[in-house]
Image (cartoon, rainbow, N blue to C red):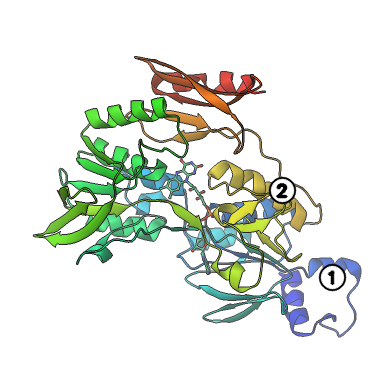
């Protein structure tokens, strides 16, 4: 607390301590003010990792949402697990404030980053930083559609969205339309099916989760979900969403009509780069960082779904854990590059479980598939004969560790 008081006074009188003297090196180290924007897994994991190393360094976290600590992956399994949105909250903001001994400002949106002044601007005023971490997450992509109910499509990317979805979800067996047969769309569809809701999945893809899965694994999942009541409308998109009685009518690009009670849009997420772009930081798909998570400005770092680390956006939990651990060391005086191990993605579709480790982008080779009643086992073999990725489904998912050991 003393260090924090000195730091806030010193931030008003740059270069001096509260007695007006030049601070010693040790004291100036103590005056570092780390500011994190975002209370998702990235922001909170980083704060926890920093506190694991340094219990004194002044830490402030500003977030646009309510600051509840929750596990976002559980949003797509909560319904069939019998959990309400409130059940998903692991620790409320006051608990996080105390546990991490930090200043936590909730429901405050940062509207600008001023790298020259080392300040961020919120609706409540300016905040100084010595080191700034952008942990801003990603924003749902909303595809263009027409119709008088198009604004009533729901997206789920945080606890507030999820609470709204649960408030609006009619009782089973209401019919739910899911636009986007990707990973998150399939997980929500699976959760709804297991809870007694028939679902229609719509998207331009030739098969589900086509950006990650080989065709045979995807088709095994598609069949299992179909057997549980999913209707697939692939290779086309929803063009119009109109009101229809107490529900909705979707018109697809092939003129087919689907009547439903609720429409969920899950067509993908794009890294939130708005603040970084406006601050003049280099941005590509995500906010560009090196392996130290440092952006184009030496005092600003980016972490989690908003970041593009060494050329790749990795919007999953495991990369966040590895990145946060490395960044906490860097920010506390031990510069550390993040190194990612092979990180398979577990797709939470208990109707037909799937685990996939896609090959690194640019790896040339082919999928080799074995399919039987147990599920699928697909290996991605590079042109020079090495195992570079895999996809397992059904009862075959328990071969994950063996395949991880066989990677070369
Ligand atoms: P977010 O959780 O989006 O946090 C961003 C934070 O930034 C929020 O607190 C937001 O309020 C704040 N913010 C944004 N802009 C501002 C601003 N201007 N001012 C102040 N605050 C701001 N990954 C897996 O590995 N396994 C899974 O099984 C899995 N399942 C998933 C299921 C679902 C339904 C979803 C949506 C994602 C899933 N993911 C999964 C992905 C994983 O959850 C994300 O990679 C991770 O949660 C992203 O964390 P984050 O902190 O980067 O972003």
Farthest residue, direction front: 254
Frontmost residue, 43 versus 351: 351
Q: Is 401 drawn above or below residue 58 in the view shown?
A: above
Quarter of the image with the C terminus in it: top right
Mark count: 2
Q: Is residue 80 visible?
A: no
Mark sitting on residue 28? 1
Q: Residue at x 31, y 37 (%)?
A: 190
Q: Does residue 86 appear anywhere in the picture?
A: yes
Q: Residue at x 59, y 39 (%)?
A: 361
Q: Which of the 4 quarters of the picture holds residue 101?
A: bottom right
**Residue reaching furthest to the left:** 245
Q: Nearer the viewer, residue 71 or 212?
A: 212
Question: At x 62% / y 55%, what residue is drawn?
Answer: 303
Which residue bears the numbered disc 2?
326
Residue 341's place in the image compared with 252, above or below, is above
Mark 1, other Cα within 10 Å: few <14 / some 14–19 / many ≥20: some
x, y percentage for residue 96?
55, 59
Residue 52 x %, y %:
69, 50
Residue drawn where x is 65% and y is 44% of the image: 322
Q: Which one is closest to the eye, mark 2 or mark 1? A: 2
What is the crowding at mark 2: few (fewer than 14 residues within 10 Å), some, or many (at least 20)?
many
Q: Secondary structure at mark 1?
A: helix
Q: Earlier in the sequence, mark 2 or mark 1?
A: 1
Residue 215 image point, x, y percent:
41, 29
Circles 2 and 1: CB distance less than 8 Å?
no
Residue 257: assigned label: none
């Amino acid at each position: 607390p003393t260090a924090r008081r000195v730091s806030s006074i010193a931030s008003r009188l740059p270069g001096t301590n509260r007695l007006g003297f030049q601070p010693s090196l040790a004291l100036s180290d103590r005056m570092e003010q780390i500011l994190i924007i975002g209370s998702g897994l990235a922001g909170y994991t980083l704060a926890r990792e920093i506190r694991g190393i340094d219990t004194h360094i002044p830490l402030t976290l500003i977030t646009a949402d309510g600051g509840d600590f929750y596990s976002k992956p559980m949003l797509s399994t909560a319904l069939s697990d019998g959990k309400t949105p409130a059940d998903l909250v692991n620790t409320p903001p006051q608990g996080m404030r105390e546990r991490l001994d930090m200043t936590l400002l909730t429901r405050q949106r940062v509207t600008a980053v001023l790298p020259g002044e080392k300040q961020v601007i919120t609706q409540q005023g300016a905040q100084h930083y010595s080191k700034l971490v952008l942990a801003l997450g990603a924003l749902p992509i909303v595809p263009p559609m027409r119709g008088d109910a198009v604004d009533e499509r729901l997206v789920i990317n945080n606890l507030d969205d999820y609470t709204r979805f649960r408030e609006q979800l009619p009782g089973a067996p209401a019919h739910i339309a899911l636009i986007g047969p990707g990973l998150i769309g399939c997980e929500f569809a699976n959760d709804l099916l297991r809870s007694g809701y028939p679902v229609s999945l719509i998207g331009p893809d030739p098969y589900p989760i086509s950006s990650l899965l080989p065709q045979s694994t995807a088709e095994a999942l598609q069949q299992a979900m179909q057997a549980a009541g999913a209707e697939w409308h692939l290779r086309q998109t929803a063009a119009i969403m109109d009101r229809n009685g107490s529900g909705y009518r979707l018109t697809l690009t092939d003129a087919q009509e689907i009547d439903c009670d609720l429409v969920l849009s899950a067509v993908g997420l794009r890294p939130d780069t708005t603040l970084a772009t406006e601050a003049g930081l280099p941005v590509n798909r995500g906010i560009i960082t090196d392996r130290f998570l440092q952006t184009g400005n030496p005092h600003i770092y980016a972490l989690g779904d908003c970041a593009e680390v060494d050329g790749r956006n990795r919007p999953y939990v495991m990369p966040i854990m590895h990145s946060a651990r490395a960044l906490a060391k860097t920010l506390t005086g031990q510069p550390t590059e993040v190194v990612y191990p092979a990180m398979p993605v577990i797709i939470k579709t208990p109707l037909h479980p799937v685990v996939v480790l896609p090959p690194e982008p640019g790896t040339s080779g082919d999928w080799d598939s074995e399919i039987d009643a147990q599920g699928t086992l697909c290996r991605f073999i590079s042109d020079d004969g090495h195992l570079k990725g895999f996809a397992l489904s059904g009862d075959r998912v328990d071969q994950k560790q063996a395949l991880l050991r066989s990677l070369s």
